[in-house]
Image (spheres, rainbow, N blue to C red):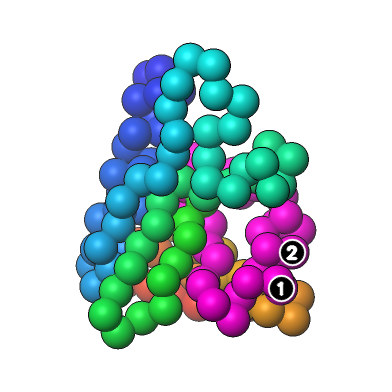
Amino acid sequence: MSSRTKGYYSVKRATEYYNSLGYIVDSVEKTGKFRKYKDLFSEWFDNKAGFDLLGVSQTNTPVLIQVTTNKPKVHKNFQKFADIFGHLIDVQQYVRTKRGKPDLVFLYLPGNAKQKIEVRNNGETGTNN
């Protein structure tokens, strides 16, 4: 499977998860042959991180989502963003894991706090701190 196909399935699964929570989700990736920064706010992170999806809801705080496959990206970049802007918008990282294992969602909260949620294929969630 090519990395582009693998990324598509990861974004698709993350979108389905956030839709089930009541969010309207859309991709915010910028594309183009000569683009240095592809993800939203990646320039702010010196291209070490950024966000792939934006989710909005009538009842929940808007959420910026970074989608990865198998391994999470470095947490300190997202935590730094959450410390500054976490009172306005939720910062999360969705990690699509290998077959048979639950996917992971990391919630980054202001004040250097992080929460990990396991997402099983049937939509159930479990929380680990």
The CA span between labels 1 and 2 is 5 Å
Which segment did they paint magenta? 67-95
Which residue is more in the foreground, 47 or 14? 47
Residue 13 placement (x, y as % from top left) = 31, 49
Residue 95 placement (x, y as % from top left) = 50, 51
The reply to whether discs 1 and 2 touch (Cβ–Cβ < 8 Å) is yes
Residue 7 is at least partly visible in this image: yes
Residue at (70, 71) in percent of width and height:
84
Q: Does the magenta stretch include residue 84?
A: yes
Drawn side of residue 45 relative to residue 95, left or right: right
Location of residue 12 (image quadrant): top left
Which residue is more in the foreground, 118 or 101? 118
Q: What is the three-letter code of the residue carrying label 2? A: Lys
How many neighbours does mark 1 have within 10 angstroms: few (below 14), some (14-19), or many (20 or more)? some
Residue at (45, 21) in percent of width and height:
32
Q: What is the three-letter code of the residue carrying label 1? A: Asp
- Extreme residue toward the bottom, this view: 59
Tally of numbered tags:
2
Q: Would you name the residue on which mark 1 appears?
A: 83
Q: Would you name the residue on which mark 2 appears?
A: 80
Residue at (38, 41) in percent of width and height:
10
Residue 27 placement (x, y as % from top left) = 35, 45
Determine the secondary structure under disc 2: helix
Q: Is residue 43 above or below residue 6?
A: below
Which residue is more in the foreground, 98 or 91? 91
Residue 116 placement (x, y as % from top left) = 57, 69
* Badge number at residue 118: none
Which residue is more in the foreground, 37 or 114? 37
